[in-house]
Image: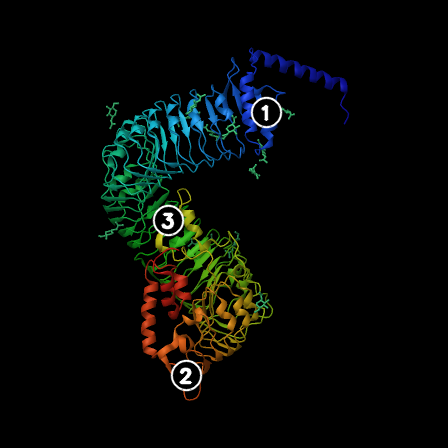
Amino acid sequence: MMIPSHRYCFYSVITIYFFLLIHTLASPTVHFCRHDQRDALLEFRDEFPTSNNTWRSSWNKSSDCCFWEGVSCDDKAGQVISLDLYTSLNSSLKTNSSLFRLQYLRHLNLSNCFLQGEVPSSLGNLSHLTLVDLSWNKLVGKIPASIGNLNNLRNLSLAYNNLVGEIPSSLGNLSRLKSLELSNNGLVDEVPTSIGNLNELRVMSLDLNSLSGKIPISFVNITNLSYLNLAYNNFSSTLPSDMSGFHNLRYFDVGSNSFHGPFPKSLFSIPLLRSVILKQNQFTGPIEFKNISSSSKLWALNLDSNQFDGPIPESISKFLNLALLHLSHNNFTGPIPKSFSKLVNLDFLRLSNNKLEGEVPSWVWSLTAVTLSHNSFSSLENSSQETLIKGLDLSWNSFRGPFPLWICKLKWLRLLDLSNNLFSGPIPTCLRNLTVSLTELTLRNNNFSGTLPDIFSNATKLQSLDVSQNQLVGTFPKSLINCKALQFVNVESNKLKDKFPSWLGSLPSLNLLIFRSNKFYGTLYHDHMSIGFQSLRVIDISHNDLAGTLPPYYFSNWCEMTTLTEGNGQYMASLPAYSLIYQSVEIVNKGVETSFERIRQDFRAIDFSGNKIYGKIPQSISVLKELRLLNLSGNAFTSDIPRSLANLTSLEALDLSRNKLSGQIPQDLSKLSFLSYMNFSHNLLQGPVPRGTQFQRQKCSSFLDNPKLYGLEEICGENLVPNPKSQQQPKELSEKEEKKFNWVAAAIAYGPGVFCGLVIGHIFTSHYHEWFTEKFGRGKNT
Ligand SMILES: *[C@@H]1O[C@H](CO)[C@@H](O)[C@H](O)[C@H]1NC(C)=O
Ligand SMILES: *[C@@H]1O[C@H](CO)[C@@H](O)[C@H](O)[C@H]1NC(C)=O
Ligand SMILES: *[C@@H]1O[C@H](CO)[C@@H](O)[C@H](O)[C@H]1NC(C)=O
Ligand SMILES: *[C@@H]1O[C@H](CO)[C@@H](O)[C@H](O)[C@H]1NC(C)=O
Ligand SMILES: *[C@@H]1O[C@H](CO)[C@@H](O)[C@H](O)[C@H]1NC(C)=O
Ligand SMILES: *[C@@H]1O[C@H](CO)[C@@H](O)[C@H](O)[C@H]1NC(C)=O
Ligand SMILES: *[C@@H]1O[C@H](CO)[C@@H](O)[C@H](O)[C@H]1NC(C)=O
Ligand SMILES: *[C@@H]1O[C@H](CO)[C@@H](O)[C@H](O)[C@H]1NC(C)=O
Ligand SMILES: *[C@@H]1O[C@H](CO)[C@@H](O)[C@H](O)[C@H]1NC(C)=O
Ligand SMILES: *[C@@H]1O[C@H](CO)[C@@H](O)[C@H](O)[C@H]1NC(C)=O
Ligand SMILES: *[C@@H]1O[C@H](CO)[C@@H](O)[C@H](O)[C@H]1NC(C)=O
Ligand SMILES: *[C@@H]1O[C@H](CO)[C@@H](O)[C@H](O)[C@H]1NC(C)=O
């Protein structure tokens, strides 16, 4: 389009005229940068040659330095008073940096600038500074004591660096300081008493350091304090007995330390108080509140993981603004107080791992997320209405009777965990009403009977389904084929009787598949199906009636066992729905109750044992380079052990016992340096047992009943008995002896605090337990 040039020109002239007019009126003193200031800035710029070029080129002599990016001047004198760069400086600040020639500087904000090296002590010379923010850099070394000279300083942040040493007591001279932020460094020892002199202080965050000892008594003089965060340090003392002097306190977090002593009830008379976090300390005794004002602002109370006991006091219900109440992992007793129904703003309630009992009242079903696991609750009050509840964990209690049908009305549920109770009767089809939103359904270890209903056609968000250890019969629900998000399926220890659903291989995210101890039959593999299982990490289909042969390429698409990928497969680390429950709060520490939580991220296992699979072990097994555990025992595999098994360089346990394998044990297996458990017993193997330390360490019984195997002298020693027909043979352990031993080992591994919990417990049938507990110990994290 043509623009009439004269009109265009006219408007432009007008615009420029007005712009100039306004500009001139607004700033009668046109300030020019003082040359000494400009030169100091230019030299400062040149101290960062590898920095981001955008700001560097804007700092040039052709424009007034007061207009350079990140620079502000005093209007009249042209002195640089503020430097606020948001860029990658990518180098250290030298003690003789030209920065320190900007002696009028009031604001220095170099947060997030990739600054390295130490905080130069000359910073203490810039006596006009009111604000210093060097947070989120890579600063090292100690906090220079000279910062204590900056007696105009109001805001100091050195948070999120790698600073070490003590907090210098000179900081107590900064009498005008309003905020002191030193979070997330490596600061140690006690907080200096002088900090208590900072009586203008509103914000003090010292969390995420290694500070220890006690909180200085002098802190009670900081009466303006509104935010105090000491979380994640090593403080070990009692809290001051009277904290009511903190009139302005809103946020109080001393979590994850070793504080002890009684419940700090003096805090709760502070009218503005919103959040109190005492979690993960060693506080003891009952909790009590006095004189709670109806206008209390308390919004969050987190007492998780202490040693509080006694009943949960009714008086909590006077905190009408309470949204988050966490009392897990204590020794609270008795029922949920009746008066809690008054807490109309409550969203998150966590009461797990206490000694609570009685009926769970129906108002609970209208919260957002509720965790009541590991208590002794015995009944549930019916809900009469639909609610918006998203997470409900009722596991490890004493609930009995039929599945509570009213749960089907809770259409927004994402997590439902009823595991480890005494529920019985059928799993109702009305659960279909929940499946649209459900991400996790856990009914493990109850007495549910009847079939697993085929209700999952709309369950597109379902990630985890666990109905293991019940009395379920019938077929495996075909509608699960629609659950493209499914990561984890566990139906172990039921009586499901169906052809093996090989279509599960098409589910793109499936990580863990546990079918152990059911009555699945037929072949694992169907000609017309692509095999898939690209994301599979752990498969346990042991102790079923599976038969048939496996084609040579059977394992070739099992990508997650071939190479480790990051990110995928949250089930290996934690259950996603628990992050839902705690989404508003903090990093989860759910403890031992989640069986799958502590499985090693790199754990890969195949257990096909106790079936009737026959034919050759597929050659393609050799691509599963990340496999840790392979159990094919108790089948009818024939022919040779593939030599390419020696390609499984991560293998730690291998059980091929009780098959019809013939030929020699491949000599190359002795090169698998992580392979510490093997079992070749009860086959038709022959020839020499490979030499090498891994083999020498095996139990003699691992080679039992292979009449033509020889070279067992070093492994078996005295347990070798002459065999008239063939080579010397290992002595048979009596059946009884073996069983007894296994049973004990199994019992240990199933107990609480086991290294890996359920999956491992089951993947490792009897024999493995001893090896496993020996190797990894009990109840220890890796
Ligand atoms: C340099 O900084 C500018 C903003 O000041 C930013 O847009 C650009 O991405 C940065 N470049 C590099 C290489 O960091
Ligand atoms: C100097 O900086 C100005 C902005 O401050 C910019 O427009 C100009 O391109 C820069 N000159 C050079 C040579 O980089
Ligand atoms: C930081 O400096 C190093 C050289 O010291 C350079 O290799 C790197 O690319 C720089 N990084 C940025 C973000 O400018
Ligand atoms: C700062 O000191 C170093 C030596 O420590 C020297 O190389 C550098 O030139 C000095 N810089 C300034 C701006 O004086
Ligand atoms: C410093 O600058 C960063 C980035 O612009 C900003 O987020 C931060 O709030 C500033 N610090 C202060 C204390 O104003
Ligand atoms: C800056 O401070 C250092 C030590 O903190 C001191 O040695 C030096 O003389 C001071 N420089 C100026 C210019 O004041
Ligand atoms: C300094 O800290 C106080 C207290 O946190 C805060 O209210 C104020 O906004 C901060 N000042 C600046 C300039 O960031
Ligand atoms: C609190 O401040 C007062 C007056 O400044 C002082 O006398 C007292 O010793 C301080 N208390 C503590 C515990 O430091
Ligand atoms: C609970 O009380 C028992 C004794 O009654 C004690 O052994 C246990 O350590 C306590 N647990 C907690 C978390 O305080
Ligand atoms: C399930 O949903 C259907 C259709 O929305 C409804 O008629 C039925 O009452 C619901 N069942 C339960 C138990 O809530
Ligand atoms: C699945 O959802 C659609 C719409 O959300 C609904 O019409 C249909 O009845 C649902 N199917 C089942 C089997 O629940
Ligand atoms: C496995 O090892 C054999 C030698 O035993 C080698 O020839 C073969 O290429 C390896 N296969 C894979 C998939 O790495």
- Does label 2 or label 3 sit earlier along the sequence? 3
Point 33% across, 53% down: residue: 373
- Nearest to viewer (mark 3 / mark 1): 1
Mark 1 sits near ligand 2, with its Cβ under 8 Å away: yes
Q: What amino acid type is highlighted by mark number 2?
A: Gln
Point 40% across, 43% down: residue: 586
Question: Helix, strand, or loop for circle 1?
Answer: loop
Image color mode: rainbow
Question: Helix, strand, or loop for circle 2?
Answer: loop
Q: What amino acid type is highlighted by mark number 1?
A: Trp
Distance of label 3 from label 1 (alpha carbons): 49 Å
Residue 265 sits in which quadrant? top left
- Nearest to viewer (mark 2 / mark 3): 2
Q: Are marks 2 and 3 in contact (CB under 8 Å)?
A: no
Check the image and report above or below for 731 versus 123. below
Residue 775 visible from this viewpoint: yes
Q: Residues within 10 Å of mark 1 (few under 14, many from 20)?
A: many
Q: Nearest the camera: 316 or 490? A: 490
Q: Which residue is mark 1?
A: 59
Check the image and report above or below for 272 versus 105. below
Q: Nearest the camera: 297 or 552? A: 552
Distance of label 2 from label 1 (alpha carbons): 87 Å
Q: Which residue is mark 2?
A: 728
Q: Position of residue 80 (x, y in %)?
A: 51, 19
Q: Which residue is mark 3?
A: 589
